[in-house]
Image: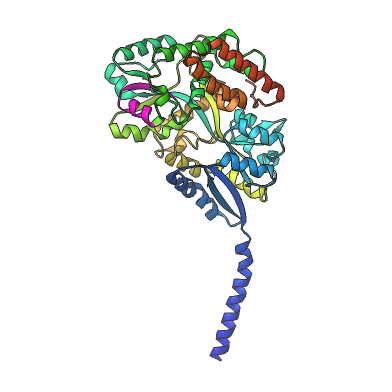
Amino acid sequence: MDEVRTLRTLLLAAAVVAMLAPAARAAERVTWWYENATPEQERILRADFVDRFNASQSQYVLDLRFDPNLDSSLRTALLAGSGPDIVFTHGVAYALPYIKNGQLMPLDDYAKRYGWYDRFLPVMISLGSHQGHLYALPKSYESMVLFYNKTLFQKNGWKVPSNREELEALARTMQAKGIVPFAQGNAGFRFANEHYVGVFLNHYAGAENIHKALTGKVPWNAPVFVDAIALLNDYYQKGWLGKDYFSLTYEDYMTLLSTGRAAMTMNGTWAFQWMPAFFGQTGQEWDWAPLPALSDQASYPLFDLGIGATLSINAAAKNADGAAAVLDRLSGDKQVITDLNRDWPGEWNLPVTTLDASDFGDKVDPRYARHADEVAEAVARGNYGYTVWTFWPPKTESYIVEGIEQVWLGEVTPQQFMDRVNELFQQELAEGSVPPTPAR
């Protein structure tokens, strides 16, 4: 009798396992290819989001793959009608060709279902849209700001400049003391060149003029833009960007800044992740401020706005619904967003309307939380400019990166540089290659 009971128990257990097995297999795989990252960054993204998402529900399993050759891998896969469910690109200009080729799925239905139109800043929805349809969500927004060595400023009684007159007087004083006004460099990352071109175009010509040029209403070789580049070149020739620009990596110039041998740096929000490490080694303090207005045509404060990366759904996705669920959790879960910003600051500042500094609490540096608040307020008021890597088309952007070096080396004049920028831009505008420019 005991043997019979044992057999029945075993058969019942087997039946239960058989019934549960299909349920366990029912979790649908969602694939996402991500750009190259350090081992620590991989750990952060998996712990703060991937593992949580997978543990929070049983319908989907997110499979995240890091790829050091993401751009080429993605391009090849999408051309073949395959690739990951979630498509990561390095900005709107990178996503636009995929959109035009029908390789990305319109997100309108998902946006309505999940409330993305209300969740994301309107300007970001406009940036990710093409011909009336939403195709790309912003993974993070970026802006250019002025980081400075606060210890050095306090020691010398210096005031953070808000206009050109104050900036230039301060730069002359710094240089006389043997201090580099701006710690900058492009060794190992030539695209840093476009950061400074964008800063001077925005903060000299002003956002309204940039908008007119981006929408084809004025040419890029108009005097106001030529004068902006001439001013940038003047600062470079004076040595205000340092004498070793072409040989300094970001580690090099951040060391100059954190030790007080340089006073300021024009940099993007990604630099928030560098500040604690470098300044922590020297015991000095840092802070940030909006970039100064360089003419009466530019407002203050003005934040040059950009998208660090976009997230879309592959038109050939095997699991579009699962991909949408991932994107919704990533942009809608406050704990996920705040933890990612705590552990990887400057890389996961999603441009959503549902967060403010109070949501971060003591998880992040208050200087970083203040930046999130101030940029959101500025965008709401229309006090934002345009980063080159987000709003300029690819051929024009490439020339800006290359051509500004020719200006600095005396091989072309600012006028010739902007003539070529305008020539390339007008060609790409006619081709429909210029990313969308939201109405002001």
Q: How is the image coloured?
A: rainbow
Where does the N terminus fall, quadrant-wise?
Answer: bottom right
- From this view, report whether residue 237 is shown above or below residue 67: above
Residue 364 percent across, percent down from the top left: 41, 37
- From this view, report whether residue 41 is shown above or below residue 177: below
Nearer the observer, 209 or 414 = 414
Q: Residue furthest bottom?
A: 1
Residue 117 percent across, percent down from the top left: 64, 35
Examine the rendering and report whether any part of residue 313 can be seen.
no
Residue 222 percent across, percent down from the top left: 60, 9
- From this view, report whether residue 228 is shown above or below residue 78: above
Nearer the observer, 263 or 330 = 263
Q: Is residue 380 left or right of residue 284?
A: right
Asked if residue 258 lies in the magenta stretch, the reply is yes
Where does the C terminus fall, quadrant-wise?
Answer: top right
Nearer the observer, 273 or 409 = 409
- From this view, report whether residue 208 is shown above or below residue 337: above
Tag count in the figure? 0
Q: Which residues are magenta?
A: 251-266
Identify the residue at horizontal 42%, vertical 35% (top origin).
Answer: 273
Identify the residue at horizontal 48%, vertical 26% (top origin).
Answer: 192
Residue 172 percent across, percent down from the top left: 35, 11
The answer to which image quadrant residue 427 occupies is top right
The answer to which image quadrant residue 104 occupies is top right
Identify the residue at horizontal 64%, vertical 24% (top origin).
Answer: 438
Examine the rendering and report whether any part of residue 63 can be seen.
yes
Asked if residue 155 lies in the magenta stretch, the reply is no
